[in-house]
Image: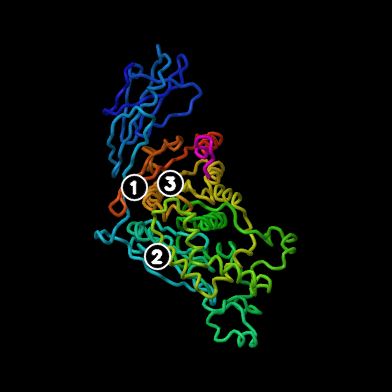
């Protein structure tokens, strides 16, 4: 049997073998095949025409006469390719398993090498009395570019998006904000007042934690650090600071808030990208959604903290704010332990030294749930035609891949990229890949899908699964990670099977 070749690139056409039926199969460097019940290998003698244009190459199978069963070893042969700035080059054929096509993507800009890096400006925006919102921005000179707003995860702030601000800010207008009660958006004054007796007993008060007083200050009477507060914070920030609809990108808690916000205010959102978004937030019932049930909980994150919560907060805070505890958490959420997290570590440690940080944590943890859960927010986005993109680190110990697959099941048209190795914070661990995917996805949305999604050769290939190895250079060292794109035609059972297969190695479960 002769194997067809196209531009000296070996390929196989997998077709549904039925008498008198003509099938079309797409040939691309992605080696992606429709999932058909009965498959055979189509040799070159069966192909009567090959057509090509700028974005698409295809062959038409006119007949399949005389096609017998094929040796399975032939099916194991494949090729891989490199793509640099849209140029494809084959590397040859291998005979041991199916090799993964390789794609060389841009590295992060390096100031040391003289690369152009976007300048980051640190700003404060007074949203409410005593509540200043800290945010960072870059690329403001790119007036006609797409605006992008980054929302941080729990316990971090805008500093966690430094690699996006410096890189993406070269082409786009970028904002990253700190949620009220986190990062550098902590209150500038104690939200509670203390009795004179207590103040005298605590000396000069330099080490006194804010928010643990006896009575709330007038401006903090209704203050609670909840997802509803953050939803409104994002709304006013977009309306008053950015002043136009934006693409919102959120990691972990930021992903939840991004989706929650988009469901309420779709007119302010051009698209949402979820980076390992947490699928739930809050423990106590929402008073609007469940008024009777919420009355069973007399305290829900407001100030002042009850006396028993104050004591618990002080004990817990001593433990979790310790440098060794912060280092251990970072070790958990980053799959690649060679990733430098010194700046992230020092920034988190700086936040923990703020006198309002401990009580803010208590308010966040006891704040009620949002009026919409994650699934309802996702439904709201889909009903309002808000584009959604999913970029998840596979080795996340908290938001495991099964959660991303559930989102993909509810929104099958959403592109879903799974990166490995990468943990809970892929934007900081593999920023080269996340930035590459974000740029490409936004171009796809801005072009009404006339521009293909990242890793795909043409828009129609969104139906198929694709796996590629993305390579990049970081500090002179060549690194890579595999990225799997889940197509819209892959069934949930197939995805579940792939997930379980990846979790069981030689009969042993690997968490």
Q: Position of residue 460 (x, y in %)?
A: 42, 36
Q: Is residue 196 magenta?
A: no
Q: Secondary structure at mark 3?
A: loop
Quarter residue 304 falls in: bottom right
Q: Secondary structure at mark 2?
A: strand
Disc 2 from disc 1: Cα separation: 29 Å
For marks 2 and 1, give the one nearer the viewer.
1
Q: Secondary structure at mark 1?
A: strand
Give the mark nearest the N terminus, 3 or 2: 2
Q: Position of residue 334 (x, y in %)?
A: 45, 53
Disc 2 marks which residue?
137
Up/down of 18 relative to 387, above or below: above
Disc 1 marks which residue?
479
Segment colored magenta = 502-511
Q: Nearer the viewer, residue 238 or 491?
A: 491
Viewed as shown, does residue 497 lie left or right of 471? right
Disc 3 marks which residue?
421
Disc 3 from disc 2: Cα separation: 29 Å
Q: Is residue 510 magenta?
A: yes
Q: Residue at x 36, y 33 (%)?
A: 99
Give the mark nearest the N terminus, 2 or 1: 2
Whether residue 29 appears in this view of the structure is yes
Q: Position of residue 346 (x, y in %)?
A: 43, 67
Viewed as shown, does residue 123 lie left or right of 299? left
Whether residue 389 appears in this view of the structure is no
Viewed as shown, does residue 87 lie left or right of 324? left
Q: Nearer the viewer, residue 163 or 258?
A: 163
Query: Label 2: how many residues lie within 10 Å, few (<14), some (14-19) or many (20+)?
Result: many
């Amino acid at each position: 049997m002769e194997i067809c070749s196209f531009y000296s690139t070996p390929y196989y056409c997998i077709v549904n073998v039925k008498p008198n039926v003509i099938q079309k199969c797409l040939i691309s460097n992605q080696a992606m095949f429709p999932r058909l019940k009965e498959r055979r290998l189509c040799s070159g003698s069966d192909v009567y025409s090959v057509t090509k244009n700028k974005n698409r190459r295809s062959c038409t199978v006119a007949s399949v006469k005389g096609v017998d069963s094929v040796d399975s070893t032939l099916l194991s042969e494949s090729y891989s390719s490199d793509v640099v700035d849209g140029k494809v080059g084959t590397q040859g054929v291998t005979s041991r398993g199916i090799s993964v096509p390789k794609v060389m993507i841009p590295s992060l800009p390096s100031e040391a090498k003289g690369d152009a890096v976007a300048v980051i400006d640190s700003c404060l925006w007074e949203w409410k009395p005593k509540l200043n919102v800290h945010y960072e921005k870059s690329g403001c000179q790119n007036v006609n570019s797409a605006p992008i707003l980054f929302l941080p995860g729990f316990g971090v702030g805008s500093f966690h998006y430094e690699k996006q601000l410096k890189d993406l800010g070269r082409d786009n207008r970028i904002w990253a904000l700190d949620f009220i009660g986190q990062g550098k958006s902590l209150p500038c004054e104690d939200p509670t007042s203390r009795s004179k007796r207590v103040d005298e007993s605590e000396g000069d008060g330099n080490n006194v934690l804010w928010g643990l007083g006896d009575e709330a200050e007038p401006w903090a009477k209704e203050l609670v650090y909840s997802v509803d507060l953050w939803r409104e914070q994002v709304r006013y920030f977009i309306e008053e600071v950015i002043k136009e609809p934006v693409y919102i990108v959120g990691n972990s808690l930021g992903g939840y808030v991004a989706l929650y916000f988009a469901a309420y205010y779709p007119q302010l959102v051009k698209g949402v990208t979820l980076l390992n978004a947490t699928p739930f937030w809050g423990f106590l019932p929402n008073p609007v959604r469940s008024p009777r049930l919420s009355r069973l909980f007399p305290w829900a994150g407001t100030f002042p903290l009850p006396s028993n919560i104050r004591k618990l907060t002080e004990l817990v805070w001593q433990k979790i704010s310790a440098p060794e505890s912060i280092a251990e958490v970072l070790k958990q959420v980053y799959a690649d332990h060679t990733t430098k997290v010194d700046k992230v570590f020092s920034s988190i440690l700086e936040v923990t030294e703020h006198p309002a940080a401990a009580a803010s944590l208590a308010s966040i943890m006891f704040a009620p749930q949002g009026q919409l859960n994650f699934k309802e927010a996702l439904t709201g986005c889909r009903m309002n035609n808000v584009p959604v993109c999913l970029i998840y680190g596979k080795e996340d110990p908290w938001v495991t891949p099964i959660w991303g697959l559930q989102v993909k099941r509810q929104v099958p048209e959403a592109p879903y990229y799974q990166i490995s190795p990468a943990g809970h914070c892929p934007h900081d661990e593999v920023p080269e890949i996340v930035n590459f995917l974000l740029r490409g996805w936004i171009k796809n949305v801005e072009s009404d899908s006339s521009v293909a999604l990242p890793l795909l050769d043409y828009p129609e290939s969104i139906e198929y699964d694709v796996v590629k190895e993305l390579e990049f250079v970081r500090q002179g060292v060549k690194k890579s990670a595999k990225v799997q794109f889940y197509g819209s035609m892959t069934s949930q059972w197939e995805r579940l099977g792939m997930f379980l297969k990846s979790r069981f190695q030689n009969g042993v479960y690997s968490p």
